[in-house]
Every structure is written in structure tokens, then in C-alpha cells.
Image (cartoon, rainbow, N blue to C red):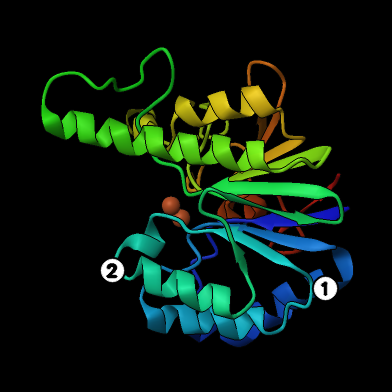
Amino acid sequence: MRLAAVADIHLKAENHERDIQQFSVVNDLADALVIAGDLTNHGNPEEMKVVLGLLEHIRIPVIAVLGNHDHESGHQDEIAGMLRVAGVHLLDGHCFEVDGIGFAGTKGFCGGFAPYELMPFGEQGIKTFVEVAEREAVKLDYGLAQTHAAKKVSITHYSPIKDTIVGEPEPIFPFLGSSRLERALEVHKPVLAVHGHAHKGTFSAETKSGVRVCNVALPILRQRGEEHPFAIFNL
Ligand SMILES: [Fe+2]
Ligand SMILES: [Fe+2]
């Protein structure tokens, strides 16, 4: 399978014609397209209509997760519904199979990276925060466990490892991902884990056990000189 993947497209209405032109070539270059969150800037239904206007031109299966920006206005359920009605396979702890590849995904959350993860100790606010991170990791683990495909792909918006966010200011690393997501990758060994969120991160790295992790945030792809607004993986 030729898999196209991107994250952090943050579509704007004023670039609509250009975006349609640039993205629609994916129909000829890939068998499926993954969008790993931050499709919009503020998660408004009006912005999602712009995204759907682009996706109308994509004829291959589209598999996506939401990002933190898609939650900003509190309309995440509505925009998730809009994506699903448009035929997007929006993953939130589920899995979906295309051509023998099992995709599992969830937004993920922050909390930092081992051995400096935030732990559920002390105030209730800290415990609630960590609980959200743990729940997201359970959802990824569940999705990966549910797909029985020989090859699996993990999709999150937040990063499961530190090495693909290197390039961002170090003080904000704990807000860009969580090692709790990495543990699900180490159990289920997907052939690829894609994420976004860290716009100034690093394209490719590996978990401790060698699972390939790629930060496909669009600004990183642009900086790498990718000809198209997505990276292509041969799985
Ligand atoms: Fe983003
Ligand atoms: Fe983000």
C-alpha cells in the first residue's frame, strides 16, 4: 500500500482553491490518506465545511483523528459527525482496515515523556489531567488490539515519543505528547506510527523497541521540501 499522511493542515477558506489543487493529486499517488489531527484552526463547524469542500475532491479512503485545535470551540462532536457523514473514517479508539492494513487511532494527550512524566499524585486537578492522558493511551491500545491485520498503523495527534518533537522549545515538550501512547506501540508493534502537533519537530525517529514514528505535521513536510502536502509511505 502507498499511504499518504499529513497532520496540522489548519485549512483556511482563503487558500481553498490552492489547497484543492495541491491535495487532489493524492488520488494518483496513494491508496489511502491519513490526516493526523488539527484539520481546522478553532474547531468551528464553518471551518469544517471548508475541510469537507477539500475532501470532496479526494477519492481514496481518508482515515483521520481530531487534534487539539479541532476541540478549541467545544464543537468536536459536531465536527466529528460532519467528517463521518462525509465518509471519513474518523478514529477515536477504533480501528479500520484498508487493503489489509489495520489503522488504529485516537487524538492522544500530553503529560510528558518517561522518566519525567506527570504522575497522578496530589491535587485532584493533576489526577484528572493524568487520567485523560491514560484514557487516550487505553483507546490507542484498544484500537491496535482490535485490528487483526498483519500490518498495523497507529495514528495520534500528540506524539508518543520525545525524539520527533525535537526542534520545539524544550520547556514545552511535556505539552506535546505522552510516553503513555508509546507503551501501546511497544505492545502492538505497528509498522508505522504517525502523529503531528509539534509543527517544529523532527520527521522520523523510533521507539525504544524500533517502531518507526513519523511526525507528519505539514510545516515539517514543507521544510523537508516535500513536493506535495503529504508524505508517502510504502507499507
Ligand atoms: Fe497544529
Ligand atoms: Fe495540535
Asked if residue 47 shows in the view, the reply is: yes
- Between 142 and 172, the one nearer to me in the picture: 142
Q: What label does residue 57 carry, if any?
A: none
Q: Residue furthest left?
A: 123
Q: Earlier in the sequence, mark 2 or mark 1?
A: 1
Residue at image location 36% in from the left, 16% down from the top: 116
Q: Picture quarter containing residue 164?
A: top right
Mark 1 secondary-structure assignment:
helix
Q: Amino acid at mark 1?
A: Asn
Q: Position of residue 199 (x, y in %)?
A: 50, 48
Compared to 35, does 104 lie above or below? above
Q: Picture quarter containing residue 22?
A: bottom right
- Between 63 and 144, the one nearer to me in the picture: 144
Q: Which residue is under mark 2? A: 73
Mark 2 secondary-structure assignment:
loop
Residue at image location 75% in from the left, 47% down from the top: 102
Q: Amino acid at mark 2?
A: Ser
Compared to 38, does 82 lie above or below? below
Binning the other alpha carbons within 10 Å of mark 2 as few (below 14), some (14 to 19) or many (20 upward) gives few
Q: Position of residue 97 (x, y in %)?
A: 76, 54
Q: Quadrant where the C terminus lies?
A: top right
Asked if residue 206 shows in the view, the reply is: no
Q: Position of residue 211 (x, y in %)?
A: 71, 26
Taking the image as shown, residue 162 lies to the left or right of residue 109, namely: right
Residue at image location 60% in from the left, 43% down from the top: 143
Binning the other alpha carbons within 10 Å of mark 1 as few (below 14), some (14 to 19) or many (20 upward) gives some
Q: What label does residue 27 carry, if any?
A: 1
Q: Position of residue 124 (x, y in %)?
A: 13, 30
Q: Residue furthest top?
A: 115
- Between 18 and 106, the one nearer to me in the picture: 106
